[in-house]
Amino acid sequence: MKNIRNFCIIAHIDHGKSTLADRLLDATGSVTAREKQEQLLDSMDLERERGITIKSHAIQMNYIHNGEPYILNLIDTPGHVDFSYEVSRSIAACEGALLIVDAAQSIQAQTISNLYLALENDLEIIPVLNKVDLPSANPEEVTDDIVDLLGCNASDVIPASAKTGLGIQEILDAIIERIPAPKGVVDEPLQALIFDSVYNPFRGVETYFRVLNGEITKGQHIKFMATGKTYYADEVGTLNLKQTPKKVIKTGDVGYLITGIKEAKEVKVGDTITDAKNPTTNMIEGFEDVKPMVFAGIYPVDTEDYEDLRSSMEKLQLNDASLVFQPESSAALGFGFRCGFLGMLHLEIIQERLEREFDMTVITTVPNVSYQAYTIKDKETPILVNNPSDLPDPSGMDRVEEPFIKASIITKADFVGPVMSLCIEKRGQITNQTYLTPERVELSFDMPLAEIVFDFYDRLKTVSKGYASFDYAPIGMRASHLVKVDVLLNANVVDALSALLHKDNAYDIGKKMCEKLKELIPRQQFDIPIQAAIGAKIIARETVKALRKDVTAKCYGGDISRKRKLLEKQKKGKKRMRQVGNVEIPQEAFMAVLKLN
Ligand code: GTP
């Protein structure tokens, strides 16, 4: 146990976490040349393409320090705020963290939020100043920023370059010298923390765990405390580049477990594994069920593909437990599913996977957060509103509450004005403003989650010319004045276009939605009125003018092959359209509310 070190790497996105992890694997000889891939830890195709570590993984390295062999377990953490619960579980499995800061970008929002998580878990922090090879690096200044943030000495900060290999040796030595060995008692009943799980189509769910007390042996009868289910440990082992089966994994170490579980949702990150017959009385604290934050409808473009879509979603859920869905129907779109996601990135990933891995063509409706409505009859029991159509009739409604977040934005002093205006426009209330350095400011806001779901990131980037980073955490439900804005096409309400909006924004957004839809809906043989309404009250109107010419009119009736080509082209264009009443609506229209600015 005294020769084990468990650590993670925390950083703001793109500060070089994955590149540095690769370097450490290289330097410890954990990778053979053949196994080397550019981004070793990011094994999913999608991850590699996006350069985002979506799921955390763990890997074991062997390292000799002053003639003594050590085991280093690196627990990788996802960088995006959608997956922050997984970051906190990974951190809980470690005694130390490398805090990577980009020498050109300095401290950013996720540097701080992840650092706080690490400090809450009493981790030893090793600050690493990465990318010192960059011509734009500001090593002295950024070191000062780190010293200010951590209250450490400048000599504690290790200058490094994951690109050139500078500082890698120093980092390895610091891991051994500064991070404490794991504590824990071998003779106690098994207590292990699940910090991740991965679905493997051949072997079922692989559970990654860290043993806090006791040990886990092959064949042991074990119990997952939050779910209460028991299993047999068919296989346990350590996580090297490949999995290495072992007879036993002891206190302090990290490993994987295979039990034959076939569904990702049976294994909950944050749960405690114990012995079925001799259980520990201490469940590891802080376990929470991950809740979806954003909801949207997913419908097949072709109504006949509904059953295919269902089976694709079920398969996806087997390996992504954070995806939730239930059937719903829409007058406009027919049968589909209301799905819950961790955030907008997660939504995009699911949509992309449905298309790539399952060859589905789907329509995604306007995303919304989850509201709680209370009726006059029952002011105590909330009605969950995950879909605008679930909102009770306003006449019988007492109040609606919406989820709020605490937002933290770090930007340059020059941009404080525009960033504040944006946050206030998004119904934010400033709660704190701290100058980290004379040029860099951290702003804190309480804001409705719904406002950041839409175009917030893009707007923030624009108003700050790219010099702002952003992070958030939920802070609970607050009362809000919401109205349901419906869209009527040709005098028919298209339910899939309805949105829940704050009363103060409803008129403006309703108007913009009509304008946007006018751009997107193709002209047809008749005028199509587009209206936005709150209840019976029309708040905006546009018209798509009737088409004058026949598309084939140009062909003089003569050139048949040209005519066929034109018609084919038209048909192809139609693929992503949905016929609602007698109006054809393209896919973009359903997401139009996201792109109003
Ligand atoms: P996520 O995994 O998406 O959270 O990002 P990350 O923090 O892991 O960053 P990643 O390792 O993907 O690096 C981001 C970019 O910075 C990549 O293009 C790397 O090649 C580059 N990079 C990383 N380290 C260095 C470095 O020391 N010097 C230079 N010049 N570039 C680096």
Image (cartoon, grey):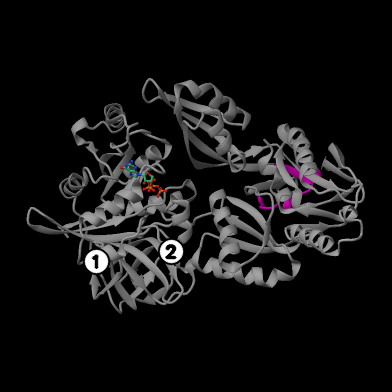
Residue 524: % across, % down: 87, 51
Please say whether residue 391 is one of the residues in the magenta stretch. Answer: yes
Q: Is mark 1 within 8 Å of ligand 1?
A: no
Is residue 254 at least partly visible in the picture?
no
* C-alpha separation, residue under disc 2 versus residue under disc 1: 19 Å
Splitting the image into 4 quarters, where does residue 156 fall?
top left
Q: Residues within 10 Å of mark 1 (few under 14, many from 20)?
A: many
* Vertical arrangement, residue 340 with respect to residue 429, above or below: below
Residue 282 is left or right of residue 452, and the answer is: left
Residue at position x 54%, y 56% from top? 349
Residue at position x 60%, y 67% from top? 313
Looking at the rendering, the stretch of residues picked out in magenta corresponds to 382-399
Splitting the image into 4 quarters, where does residue 220 fall?
bottom left
Identify the residue under disc 2.
226
Q: Secondary structure at mark 1?
A: loop
Q: Secondary structure at mark 2?
A: loop
Viewer-nearest residue: 423 or 277: 423
The kind of residue on which mark 1 rests is: Gly
Q: Is mark 2 within 8 Å of ligand 1?
A: no
Residue 338: % across, % down: 66, 59
The kind of residue on which mark 2 rests is: Ala
Identify the residue under disc 1.
214
